[in-house]
Image (cartoon, helix red, strand yellow):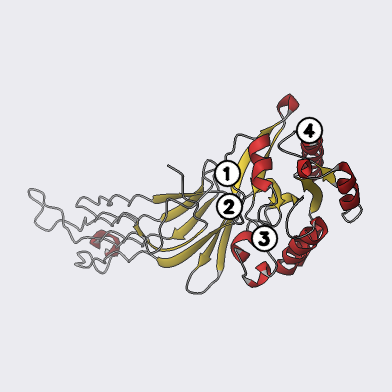
């Protein structure tokens, strides 16, 4: 069964209540007035979000869900401290941005493997009566209760992290490219918005070099204002090292208009994405003549690649250029 792609979810988290302290006194033979020995409670468990690189979706969560950490245990006699409540670990994919849903404050951007955020802190434990003993009050009958854990309503937004992202208008051929060069199998059909969720593919090159390529949903004019898949698409664009503009032959929009439309919408959403490296690809070259290809290239940026996933034309050059750019960027980042 096909896995649902979930990239936006809101739910509630509750830290565990702290355990209560108790009132207790020593009961020993020949010691009629034993001192206080009531122990403290245990701290409440916390709700923790932790990055799991194996995940690519928020499908394990549902809107309106409630997660509670374990409460701490009460203290015991003989100054025994109650057991601490267990933390509840919620695994999220890299690229998960965490917001306080009520204040809209961004709490954390979880990008690294194993990175952790405490979403709701456990409550403080109560104190037993032995902790209140003093030279003036040698037999206190006072203990405190544990405090409630922290409550938060949080919103998770997933922005997929990939080395390169395929962007273009609907039906430009992005999914076919991804399925040709990787083991990913995105849905492919000859109608707009076949890809309504991002898909990731791992590309393995020579000498152990590999990179992640993302097939992102098709973009139409007005997306930066919410048209079509709109902001749902654009949120996934900014996590890529390289944007690969795929313009398809044989569509209603000319390749030049496709490139202009997609690029303008991306920069309207976030102007500094202009700093990302880009590669322009003319796909579906098998549908047009070489003369038509030459005319189209005159309207597109210099060094535009011409490919056909059906015939294999230009696919090796596409992989070589993409992997080379990613390799250089990784070296620069180091």
Residue 228 vs residue 42: left or right? right
Query: Real-space Cα distance between discs 2 and 3?
Result: 12 Å
Q: Secondary structure at mark 1?
A: loop
Is residue 334 at least partly visible in the picture? no
Q: Secondary structure at mark 2?
A: loop
- Sequence order check, earlier mark of 4 and 3: 3
Query: Real-space Cα distance between discs 4 and 3?
Result: 26 Å
Q: Which residue is mark 4?
A: 316
User: Given the current orientation, which residue lies at the most extreme top position?
Assistant: 207
Q: Residue 313: which quarter of the image?
A: top right
Query: Real-space Cα distance between discs 1 and 2?
Result: 9 Å
- Sequence order check, earlier mark of 1 and 4: 1
Q: Secondary structure at mark 4?
A: helix
- Sequence order check, earlier mark of 2 and 4: 2
Q: Which residue is mark 1?
A: 186
**Residue found at x 76% / y 65%:** 267
Q: Position of residue 311 (x, y in %)?
A: 74, 34
In the image, is residue 139 above or below residue 30?
below
In the image, is residue 128 above or below residue 249?
below
Foreground mark, 1 or 2?
A: 2
Q: Which residue is mark 3?
A: 219
Marks 1 & 2, CB-CB < 8 Å contact: yes
Foreground mark, 2 or 4?
A: 2
Work out whether residue 126 or residue 168 is closer to the camera in this orientation and state it: 168
In the image, is residue 283 above or below residue 235?
above
Query: Real-space Cα distance between discs 2 and 4?
Result: 26 Å
Is residue 89 at least partly visible in the picture? yes
Residue 253 vs residue 8: left or right? right
Q: Position of residue 146 (x, y in %)?
A: 29, 64
Q: Which residue is mark 2?
A: 194
Quadrant containing the N terminus in the rendered view: top left
* Circle 4 residues within 10 Å: few <14, some 14–19, many ≥20: few
């Amino acid at each position: 069964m096909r896995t649902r792609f979930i990239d936006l979810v809101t739910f509630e988290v509750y830290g565990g209540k702290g355990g209560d302290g108790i009132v207790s006194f020593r009961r020993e033979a020949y010691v009629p007035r034993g001192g206080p020995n009531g122990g403290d409670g245990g701290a409440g468990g916390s709700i923790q979000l932790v990055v799991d690189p194996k995940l690519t979706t928020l499908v394990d969560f549902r809107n309106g869900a409630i997660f509670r950490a374990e409460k701490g245990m009460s203290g015991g006699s003989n100054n025994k401290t109650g057991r601490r409540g267990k933390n509840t670990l919620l695994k999220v994919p890299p690229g998960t941005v965490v917001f306080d849903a009520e204040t809209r404050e961004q709490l954390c951007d979880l990008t690294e493997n194993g990175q952790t955020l405490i979403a709701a802190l456990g409550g403080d434990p109560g104190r037993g009566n032995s902790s209140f003993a003093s030279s003036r009050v040698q037999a206190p009958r006072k203990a405190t209760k544990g405090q409630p854990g922290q409550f938060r309503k949080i919103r998770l937004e997933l922005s997929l992290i990939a080395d390169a992202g395929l962007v273009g208008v609907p039906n430009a051929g992005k999914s076919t490219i991804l399925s040709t060069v990787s083991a990913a199998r995105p849905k492919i059909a000859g109608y707009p918005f076949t890809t309504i969720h991002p898909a990731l593919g791992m590309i393995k090159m020579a000498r152990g070099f590999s990179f992640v390529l993302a097939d992102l949903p098709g973009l139409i004019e007005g997306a930066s204002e919410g048209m079509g898949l709109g902001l749902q698409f654009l949120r996934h664009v900014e996590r890529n090292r390289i944007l690969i503009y795929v313009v398809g032959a044989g569509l209603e929009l000319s390749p030049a208009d496709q490139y202009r439309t997609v690029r303008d919408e991306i920069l309207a959403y976030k102007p500094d994405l202009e700093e990302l490296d880009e590669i322009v690809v003319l796909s579906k070259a098998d549908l047009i003549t070489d003369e038509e290809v030459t005319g189209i290239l005159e309207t597109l940026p210099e060094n535009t690649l011409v490919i056909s996933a059906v015939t294999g034309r230009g696919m090796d050059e596409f992989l070589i250029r993409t992997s080379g750019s990613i390799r250089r960027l990784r070296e620069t980042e180091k």
